[in-house]
Amino acid sequence: MVIKYYDRLLDEKLPLYLETFGSVLIEGPKWCGKTTTASKHAKSILKMQDPGQVKNNLLIADTAPQLLLEGEKPRLIDEWQAAPVLWDSVRVAVDESGEAGQFILTGSATPNTESTMHTGTGRIARFLMRPMSLFESLDSTGSVSLKRLFEGEDVEGSRSNLAIRDIAFITCRGGWPQSIGKKEASALLIADQYVTSVYKQDIHKVDGSKKDPLRVQQFLKSYARNVQTLAKNDTILEDMMPNDLGITAPTMYAYHNALRRLFIIEETPAWAPNIRSQTAIRTSCKRGFVDPSIAAAVLGQTPDSLLKDFELFGFLFEALCVRDLRIYAEQMDGQVFHYRDDYGLECDAVIQLKNGDFALVEVKLGGKAEEVAAVDLNKLESLLISKGFAPPRFKMILTGGEYAYARKDGVLVVPLGCLKH
């Protein structure tokens, strides 16, 4: 059976990077499609963790790593971190030949030796690949382009095909390529098995230290209960205490760091424009996973249970929106931040481009909350202008609704099921 390949946004950028740099590194969580996409652009492939070759590959890496680099170029070296020495071997090979497009490296974890490795600056370009956005999984119509919003295009006439139950399912399913197009039970099982493999297997491999799977699972649950919030470490630790009196702060930090290195945890940094005193702006990162399905699976949620708990659904929907905004913004070399200050003013997502242009985004599933979101967006815009900032290119409420439109106050209302890069 031929497995359908869904085009990824990375497919659009990778050719230019291969024409420019000697090597390209694609990092991201396992199962997000790195190997499949990289294979489309490679002419030879080395799979470091191929069960039939792994011992031999590691032996060669220890003795003559340059032999593993032989093959038609671009050569894909999949899961290169299994033998970290390959990083410097690739760098040297690129230096010696001076040619672009020689290697594509993929990795599902950052190696322990990263701090002692040469950065590869100028030779090895980096990409972070996440699970699929709704546009990549064909769940979004793509009738509203983030890029064109920055250029001033309107949104009238755009319509999402997603009902609220669809959004609940997509949130629990996530963007894992294996789950796209599968029946609901199978798709949800994939997300559940992903989480299980993380705390039972993967987290031990990232730094070689054995960890208690049940304790890691408990950390994931406590962390998931605080997703898309500014919860402090002490809050997460206290949440774990009733089920694990022996848990300590250093152990919790070790779990957090390991999950970050596995690209499971991805937090949203704070946007800190010079508009208030330094003490007034919250600089903490917003808690989050690389995909909302991780939190849903950890908490045992299903589409139907989310529809009975709209408070939790709201947090997970925000996580879904932030995931997609990150993917779309990075196509424009942009970043996603959050804003919150001690005066109660906040913004779920601030998209900032390299040229300084930015947009303000609030996330609401729908209903009367949109009115509050619009007021907050306009307040933040007024504050920025009063401090000498240029106004945002646009203000948007990203929703789980059906229709896109512009409000009289200038705020755009856009369903997530319409959005693309």
Image (tube, rainbow, N blue to C red):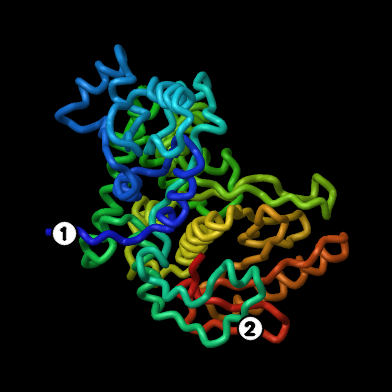
Rendering coords of residue 29 (x, y %): 38, 44
Left or right: 82 with respect to 420? left
- The residue indicated by pointer 1 is 2
Q: Which of disc 1 and disc 2 is earlier in sequence? A: 1
Instruction: Work out whether residue 245 can be spotted.
Output: no
Rendering coords of residue 235 (x, y %): 56, 43
Q: Is residue 383 above or below residue 16?
A: below
Rendering coords of residue 185 (x, y %): 22, 63
Q: Residue at x 67, y 64 (%)?
A: 359
Q: Depth check: give the residue in front, 204 or 116.
A: 116
Q: Is residue 243 above or below residue 366?
A: above
Quarter location, residue 188: bottom left
Q: Residue at x 50, y 50 (%)?
A: 288
Q: Depth check: give the residue in front, 196 or 418.
A: 418
| Kind of residue indicated by mark 2 | Ala
Left or right: 34 with respect to 17? left
Quarter location, residue 381: bottom right
| Label of residue 109 in the image | none
- The residue indicated by pointer 2 is 406
Looking at the rendered image, the disc whose residue lies closer to the viewer, 2 or 1, is 1
Q: Is residue 393 above or below residue 215?
A: below
Instruction: Work out whether residue 301 can be spotted.
Output: yes
Mark 1 falls on what kind of element?
A: loop
| Kind of residue indicated by mark 1 | Val
Q: Residues within 10 Å of mark 1 (few under 14, many from 20)?
A: few
Mark 2 → mark 1, Cα distance in angstroms: 43 Å
> Which quarter shows the N terminus?
bottom left
Q: Residue at x 82, y 51 (%)?
A: 274
